[in-house]
Image: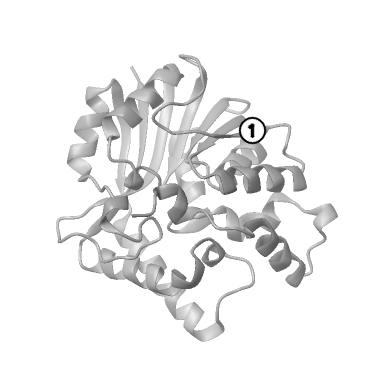
């Protein structure tokens, strides 16, 4: 079975992104973070969900933030741009870390963002390092969730905030595959919302906000599918990260949401 890193990793990704930017008449010598928005939001509801999560979290300007499962660095660049944060990202996929670094350099954020190829279960940071830990659509690939959340709690300072936007198990049957986070069952580890909440509280977090965004997520997928049927895929978008199976993965997520096989939640927690 391919590893999680192999599921996500693909060669030539930076070239594909820069070619798409040129197709949109973007000047690579004068890129802005906004130019990367279509590729920076590899999660349900894109920038809309990111803005919601940031507002829910009440992020302080200039904080030191950890982006867990940083991917191509989109969330890191968002936090650096919008809140002047110093952000360190960790991701298991080497290609993603390399591309994230290159994209941050292209938009002038290399000094505020740094990406480490490492496991989220064993990050290269000291205890009590960060003011904020942020993650979007990551834990679905991690079986040992207790180890994940203990590690996040370890590197957060007391009173620091952990915020997430994640796909969780629904009350229905297991999800149809492939989906963006998994091609095979052994790559997907979904947890029910109530079980996740109990686990987070058991490792020292207090829940400040817990929001079910499943319906909005389903509506967003349906609208996006209809838009792509009408206009086709744009030059730059998250389909570049999913390869030839992108249409099937997108349609399966919409179907999984409709059939209650998955749910979507946003949450803000505080390290006690």
Quarter of the image where one finds residue 218: bottom left
Taking the spot 58% from the left edge, 31% from the top edge, the residue there is 88
Residue 173 picture quarter:
bottom left
In the drawing, does residue 214 fall left or right of residue 77? left
Q: How many marks?
A: 1
Can residue 198 be seen here?
A: yes
Work out whether residue 72 or residue 200 is closer to the camera in this orientation and state it.
Answer: 72
Q: In this picture, is 228 found above or below 95?
A: below
Residue 222, x across and y down, in percent: 38, 73
Q: Residue furthest front?
A: 1
Query: In front here: 52 or 129?
Result: 129
Secondary element under disc 1, as helix, strand or loop, is: strand
Is residue 170 placed above or below 272 in the rendered structure? Answer: below
Q: Residue at x 72, y 66 (%)?
A: 19
Q: Is residue 109 above or below residue 30?
A: above
Q: In the image, 108: left or right of 37? A: right
Quadrant of the snapshot with the C terminus: top left
Q: Which quadrant of the figure contains the N terminus?
A: bottom left
Give the quarter of the image for residue 80: top right
Q: Residue 156, image x and y in percent? A: 44, 20
Residue 107 seen in render: no
- Measuring 27% from the left and 52% from the top, which residue is drawn there? 186
Camera-nearest residue between 117 and 32: 117
Residue pointed to by mark 1: 114
Q: Is residue 258 left or right of residue 246?
A: left
């Amino acid at each position: 079975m391919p590893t999680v890193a192999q599921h996500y990793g693909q060669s030539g990704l930076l070239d594909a992104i820069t070619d798409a930017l040129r197709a949109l008449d973007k000047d690579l010598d004068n890129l802005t973070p906004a130019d990367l928005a279509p590729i920076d939001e590899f999660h349900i509801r894109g920038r809309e969900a990111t803005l919601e999560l940031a507002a829910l979290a009440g992020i302080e300007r200039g904080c030191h933030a950890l982006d867990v499962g940083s991917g191509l660095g989109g969330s890191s660049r968002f936090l650096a741009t919008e809140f002047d944060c110093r952000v360190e990202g960790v991701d298991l996929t080497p290609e993603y870390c390399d591309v994230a670094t290159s994209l941050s350099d292209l938009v002038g954020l290399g000094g505020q963002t740094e990406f480490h190829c490492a496991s989220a279960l064993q990050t290269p940071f000291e205890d009590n390092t960060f003011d904020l830990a942020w993650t979007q659509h990551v834990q679905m690939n991690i079986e040992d969730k207790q180890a994940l959340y203990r590690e996040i709690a370890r590197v957060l300072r007391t009173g620091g905030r952990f915020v997430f936007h994640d796909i969780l198990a629904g009350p229905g049957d297991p999800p149809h595959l492939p989906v963006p986070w998994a091609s095979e069952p052994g790559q997907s580890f979904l947890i029910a919302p109530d079980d996740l909440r109990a686990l987070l509280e058991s490792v020292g977090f207090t829940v400040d906000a817990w929001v079910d965004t499943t319906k909005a997520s389903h509506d967003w997928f349906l609208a996006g599918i209809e838009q792509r049927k009408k206009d086709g895929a744009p030059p730059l978008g998250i389909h570049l990260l999913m390869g030839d199976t992108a249409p099937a993965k997108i349609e399966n997520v919409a179907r999984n949401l409709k059939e209650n096989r998955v749910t979507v939640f946003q949450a803000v927690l505080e390290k006690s």
